Amino acid sequence: MLATNKALVKVAKLYRSAQADVLSALGLHPGQDVLLWMLGQEPDGMTVSEIAARLGVEQPTVTRSLSRLHQGGWFLREAVPGDRRATRVQLTRKGRAAIPEIEAAWRTLAETATAGMTDDTRAALVELLEKVRGNLLTLAAETE
């Protein structure tokens, strides 16, 4: 079990570092890519609460992430008619143009991480990682 723990920690750290390096070329930090990509899938934009629900995080977390991204001109905020508290977030032209670049960065990361693996091995890896994720989610649920 110690070997499993070491391997997971090493891979997680290396992946996060590689992710930060690849995304920095786009002017983004890890996590910001997912938020922008998700907004790119919704041409009419999303409210902060919709973003939070989709990401599985709290609204203040989304608000902080959006604040950090705001200076980059990636998106616009607009009031939601009939709801003074709600804000709709929509990508700008710059934000929409970044979506293919984000996807290319993800491809680079995945291809680098799985270089030398067959398609079957890659599929098995995804299946195993999803199993690990599911197992960890049960642990997280138990501690809440």
Image (cartoon, rainbow, N blue to C red):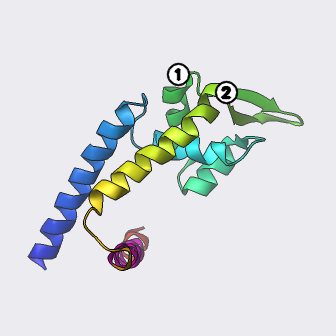
- Taking 61 as reference, is 85 left or right? right
Q: Which stretch appears magenta?
A: 121-137
Compared to residue 114, the image places residue 102 above or below, namely above
Q: Amino acid at mark 1?
A: Gly
Residue 128 visible in the snapshot? yes
How crowded pointer 1 is (Cα within 10 Å; few <14, some 14-19, many 20+) is rated as few
Q: Is residue 90 left or right of residue 59?
A: right
Q: Quadrant where the N terminus lies?
A: bottom left
Q: Is residue 59 visible?
A: no
Residue 129 in the image: state x and y as whole percent: 36, 73
Is most of the magenta stretch helix, strand or loop?
A: helix
Where residue 105 appears, x then y in whole percent? 42, 44
Residue 72's tag is 1
**Which three-letter amino acid code belongs to the residue tagged 2?**
Arg
Which of the pair 119/94 is nearer the observer?
Answer: 119
Q: Which of the labelled discs sits on residue 120, or is there none?
A: none
45 to 14, vertically: above or below:
above
Mark 2 = which residue?
Answer: 93
Q: Is residue 111 above or below residue 71?
A: below
Q: Residue placed at 36% from the left, 72% from the top?
A: 122
**135 lies left or right of 8:** right
